[in-house]
Image (cartoon, helix red, strand yellow):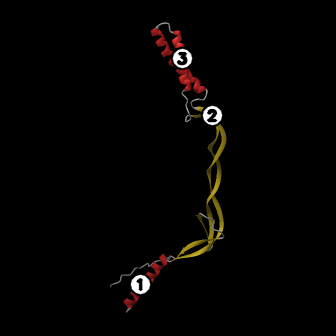
Amino acid sequence: MKTTLAILTAGVLMSGIAFAKHNKQYDYAKVIEAEPITKHIRISTPRQECWDEEVVRYDHSGYRSATPTLLGSVIGGAIGNELGHHKDAKRAGVVVGALLGGSIGRDLGHRAGGQGGKYYTTEQVCKTYQDYHDEERIVGYHVLYKYRGEVYSTETENHPGDRIKVRVSVIPVEEFSHPQRYRY
């Protein structure tokens, strides 16, 4: 009976110690001070500026007349025919005159707007710039709090207010100093 009572008493005490080691409770402590923890950061803000700008455009899709080239070829051929004195020279003069007249006629047609008209238009042009400024931001708080007459400190992400929740653990000061052996 004595052995059974000793085993039962030891078991109750051991379970009490195990319970006490893992027994966690919560309470509130008074906040004495909460100092902000700050960090300097650089902020980039995009800014867009737009303006109207006159630009040159060319119209390559319109009607393209062959009249200046043909007319230049005919006139150049006639001049070449008049300048040649011999039969072979007249033929060569007609060919050279026609080619040269056609080229001159084509160039005159381009200048007159016959092929690919040039025009001006206004378009909006925009450019994005980055504006920078430094800013001080609160990244947390260094908190001093008092619980049961003792002062403690911690860091929190948010301001705790007037009180802070604390976890209280109950741990025995002294464990068995003379462990006993039990037979089963």
Asked whether residue 106 appears in the rendered view, the answer is: no
Q: Can you tell which of label 2 and label 1 is closer to the viewer?
A: 2
Residue assigned mark 3: 76
Height in image: 10 above or below 102?
below
Residue assigned mark 2: 119
Height in image: 1 above or below 72?
below
Rendering quarter of residue 38: bottom right
Residue 95 percent coordinates (x, y): 48, 16
Marks 2 and 3, how far apart at CA: 32 Å
- The dot on residue 181 is none
| Near-viewer residue (27 or 179) | 27
The kind of residue tagged 3 is: Gly
| Near-viewer residue (85 or 135) | 85
| Near-viewer residue (89 or 38) | 89
Residue drawn at the location 50% of the way across and 9% of the way down: 84
Q: Can you tell which of label 2 and label 3 is closer to the viewer?
A: 3
Residue drawn at the location 65% of the way across and 52% of the way down: 135
Helix, strand or loop at label 1? It is helix
Q: Which mark is first along the chain, 3 or 1?
A: 1
Residue 89 percent coordinates (x, y): 47, 9
Other residues around mark 3 within 10 Å, as few (<14) / some (14–19) / many (≥20): many
The kind of residue tagged 1 is: Gly
Residue 79 percent coordinates (x, y): 54, 13
Marks 1 and 3, how far apart at CA: 128 Å
Give the residue furthest to the top.
Answer: 85
Residue assigned mark 1: 11
The kind of residue tagged 2 is: Tyr
Other residues around mark 1 within 10 Å, as few (<14) / some (14–19) / many (≥20): few
